[in-house]
Image (spheres, coloured by chain):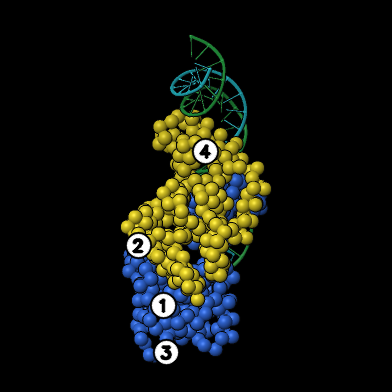
Chain colours: A yellow, B blue, C cyan, D green
Amino acid sequence: MNKTAPHNIVIVDDHALFASSLEKLVNSFNGFNVLYHARNGKDLQLKLKQIPDKPELILLDLNMPVMDGFETMEWLRENQEEIKVLALTMEDDEEKIIKMLSSGAKGYLLKDIHPEKLNEALVQTLEKGFYHSEKVAESLLHSLNSNPSEKPEFKEREIDFMKLACTEMTYKEIADKMNLSPKTIDGYRQELFNKLDVKNRVGLVIYALKNDITKI
Amino acid sequence: MNKTAPHNIVIVDDHALFASSLEKLVNSFNGFNVLYHARNGKDLQLKLKQIPDKPELILLDLNMPVMDGFETMEWLRENQEEIKVLALTMEDDEEKIIKMLSSGAKGYLLKDIHPEKLNEALVQTLEKGFYHSEKVAESLLHSLNSNPSEKPEFKEREIDFMKLACTEMTYKEIADKMNLSPKTIDGYRQELFNKLDVKNRVGLVIYALKNDITKI
DNA sequence: TCCTGCAATAGGATTTTTCCTATTTAATGT
DNA sequence: ACATTAAATAGGAAAAATCCTATTGCAGGA
């Protein structure tokens, strides 16, 4: 069909099965060819160094061990500016979308998109330089409109405290663990209750879990 | 290569991109052919009814809207006994593995397996009738050994209480909501603390969330 | 009917949490 | 050296949570 050289793509994803499957899919698109895939950012750095053929575009997963999508994106922006990057991930978290796009990603795809959309995204990114799905565009608009509710910032110690507050420890025990007076802990507690608009420790725990301050 | 008719496979997964990608991968295996894919259990029922060609094997995702993998597995066991099923999912939750296998799944694959393993699993399932990856086999052994820790049973009211305990309500408020005396609530609380071996309300909240008693 | 088991309830004490306000200390810029 | 600020700390009190034990009411089985 297409006589010109196909566009070289690289896939970065720690899920071997998904990466391999996706490779087959991308190869089935007209005019695209998957050069190789990398397990994570580190692996990608290595392969970019060792393999002379450079991709035009990278499909980058965000959740990876070793070196995740964000770190990888930062590194690519600094070291491989010519390569276009499309973020490809499960989560449509507004914060993450903004973070990736402002780090220089050309687009942000959700893994539940239709295969034809992926094809469209690849073509459009190479042609126009960017691609934004309806869903992501919507998310962005939403975040611009409803942004007055900015997320509060936390100090290191506050985050430490919140994590410990999500355990069965009493405040006295937490104070010991953090080498602070119980009264200082009480100060953190109060400050956080106000900042987060919660009524009690359970509210704090729920906030911390909802916002990935800590995992259980 | 293989002159005999290829083995027909059906993929059930709500992620269009993954399903389509996986289709390409499976088609690339020697002797396999993907008939079609379904978005969920309901969709599968429909397609099994409408499409005369029956698959020999179904690759079944667990997390789906509408009709999830567990329900689908139950239905398949009752209505399409001849079709072999391999569960294919992200989570290596022992409970889920056991649930699927005891519902008649021929194997349980994690989505992070290597593509060749998938090929192997398909071949072996059709030949021997089952496939168990090292990881899953290990999980099963582990669960058999360390099973003395059975999960406690909860009464309706206890579950109601736990859900409310995972909010910012005080016990007095919870008592009002449940139309019980605060002292009764205190009884539930104490009983649950003992049963679950937790020290305080935060412990209870964490237990409830870990065990999907409630969502946040 | 009597016994038994379970859910609901209570009394009373102690500990922890929560709230409000104020002071000390350390760090930082001018 | 002095003003400014943020972090750490304190006092004191009310509210909520936690603990232990005991009683009541009711339903079902012997």
Labels 2, 1: one chain: yes
Q: Residue A154 got which mark?
A: 4
Element assignment for label 4: loop
Q: Amino acid at mark 4?
A: Phe
User: Does label 4 lie on the same chain as label 3?
Assistant: no
Please state the chain letter of the residue tagged with numbered disc 4 in the rendered image.
A
Q: Residues within 10 Å of mark 1 (few under 14, many from 20)?
A: some
- Residue C23, percent from left and from top: 53, 17
Q: Nearer the viewer, residue A43 or B18?
A: A43
Picture residue at 40% right of the left edge, 54% below the top? A41
Vertical placement of residue B89 versus B74, above or below: above
Residue A83 rendering spot, x and y as whole percentages: 46, 55
Does label 1 or label 3 sit earlier along the sequence? Answer: 3
Q: Which residue is mark 2?
A: B146
- The structure residue drawn at horizontal position 65% and vertical position 51%, both measured from the top left corner, is A142
Type of the residue with mark 1 = Ser
Question: Which amino acid, mark 3?
Answer: Ala
Report the amino acid beneath label 2: Ser
State the separation of the CA atoms marked 2 and 1: 41 Å
Figure check: A192 above or below B189: above
Residue located at (55% from left, 89% from top): B52
The image shows a total of numbered marks equal to: 4
- The reply to whether discs 4 and 2 touch (Cβ–Cβ < 8 Å) is no
Q: Callout 3: helix, strand or loop?
A: loop
Q: Position of residue C2 (x, y in %)?
A: 55, 62
Q: Which residue is mark 1?
A: B28
Could you tell me which quadrant the N terminus of chain B lies in?
bottom left
